[in-house]
C-alpha cells in the first residue's frame, strides 16, 4: 500500500507542479530557444526500475552535438554548457520537465538519480550493489543530491551509490518528506536560489 500511496502522491504532486508553474515552463522554454540554436528539450536514455531503459526529459542546457565524441561527464566551467544552461543547472530549472516523466510512471519525485548504461557498466566494475537500486523508481531528487552534487568523477559516482543504497534501506514517508523539504529550501535559499525566485516571478508576469 505504501508503493501505491507513493505513486498517487507522485501523480498528484507532478500535476500540481506542472499546472502551477506552467508560466515558468513557458519562460524557460523561450529562454532555451533564444539562448542557442537547437531543440528546447533534451532526451537521454537512462536506466530505471527493473533495469529497464527510459528516456529522461530535460530542458537543453548544452550546445548541440555536445557529445559527438561520445559520453562525457559534465564538469565545472564546462564549455559545452550554454550561458543560460549554466543558470538552469545552478537553479535546477533544467530538471523540471522530469515531472512529465514522473507522470509517465518511469520516475518518482524522490528516489535515486538514474544513470546511463555506459556509466553503470563502469560503476558495476567497482561495486556490483548498483543493481539493488533497480528495486525502485529513480527520482527527480534524491538523498545523495545534497551531498554529492553533479557527479563528474568515478569517485563521486561511487560515493553517490553509498547514499543511494542508504536511502534504499531506510526509505519511508518521513524520509521522503525530509528530502523534499531540504530540496525545496536548498533551491530557494541555496546557491543560485534567488535566481530561481526571479525566474518564477518573471515567468508568471509574461
Image: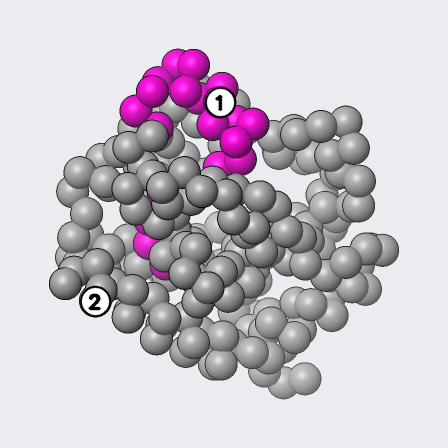
The quarter of the rendered structure image containing the C terminus is bottom right
The local crowd at label 2, few if under 14, some if 14 to 19, many if 20 or more residues have their Cα within 10 Å, is few
- Judging depth in this view, the residue of 181 and 168 nearest the camera is 168
Residue 43 lies left or right of residue 181; in this view the side is right
| Residue at mark 1 to residue at mark 2: CA–CA distance | 33 Å
Residue at 29% of width from left, 28% of height from top?
A: 162
Residue at 78% of width from left, 64% of height from top?
A: 33
The x and y percentages for residue 64 are 80, 45
Residue furthest toward the right?
A: 37
Q: Is residue 190 above or below residue 116?
A: below
* Residue 94 seen from this side: yes
Q: Which residue range is magenta in the image?
A: 109-130
- Judging depth in this view, the residue of 54 and 68 nearest the camera is 54
In the rendered image, which residue does mark 1 sit on?
A: 121
In the rendered image, which residue does mark 2 sit on?
A: 5
The x and y percentages for residue 166 are 22, 35
- Judging depth in this view, the residue of 82 and 64 nearest the camera is 64
The quarter of the rendered structure image containing the N terminus is bottom left
Q: Is residue 28 above or below residue 67?
A: below
Question: Under tag 2, what secondary structure?
Answer: helix
The local crowd at label 1, few if under 14, some if 14 to 19, many if 20 or more residues have their Cα within 10 Å, is few
For marks 1 and 2 on the same chain, the one whose residue lies earlier in the sequence: 2
Amino acid at each position: 500500500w505504501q508503493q501505491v500511496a507513493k505513486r498517487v502522491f507522485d501523480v498528484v504532486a507532478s500535476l500540481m507542479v506542472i499546472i502551477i508553474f506552467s508560466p515558468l515552463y513557458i519562460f524557460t522554454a523561450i529562454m532555451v530557444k533564444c539562448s542557442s540554436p537547437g531543440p528546447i528539450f533534451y532526451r537521454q536514455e537512462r536506466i530505471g526500475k527493473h533495469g529497464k531503459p527510459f528516456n529522461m526529459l530535460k530542458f537543453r542546457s548544452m550546445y548541440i552535438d555536445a557529445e559527438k565524441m561520445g559520453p562525457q561527464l559534465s564538469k565545472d566551467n564546462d564549455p559545452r554548457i550554454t550561458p543560460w544552461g549554466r543558470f538552469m543547472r545552478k537553479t535546477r530549472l533544467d530538471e523540471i520537465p522530469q515531472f512529465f516523466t514522473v507522470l509517465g510512471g518511469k520516475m518518482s519525485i524522490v528516489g535515486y538519480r538514474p544513470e546511463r548504461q555506459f556509466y553503470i557498466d563502469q560503476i558495476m566494475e567497482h561495486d556490483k550493489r548498483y543493481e539493488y537500486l533497480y528495486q525502485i523508481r529513480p527520482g527527480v531528487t534524491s538523498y545523495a543530491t545534497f551531498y554529492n552534487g553533479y557527479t563528474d568523477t568515478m569517485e563521486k559516482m561511487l560515493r553517490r551509490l553509498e547514499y543511494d543504497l542508504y536511502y534504499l534501506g531506510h526509505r519511508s514517508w518521513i524520509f521522503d518528506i525530509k528530502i523534499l523539504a531540504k530540496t525545496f529550501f536548498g533551491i530557494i535559499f541555496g546557491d543560485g536560489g534567488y535566481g530561481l525566485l526571479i525566474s518564477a516571478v518573471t515567468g508568471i508576469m509574461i
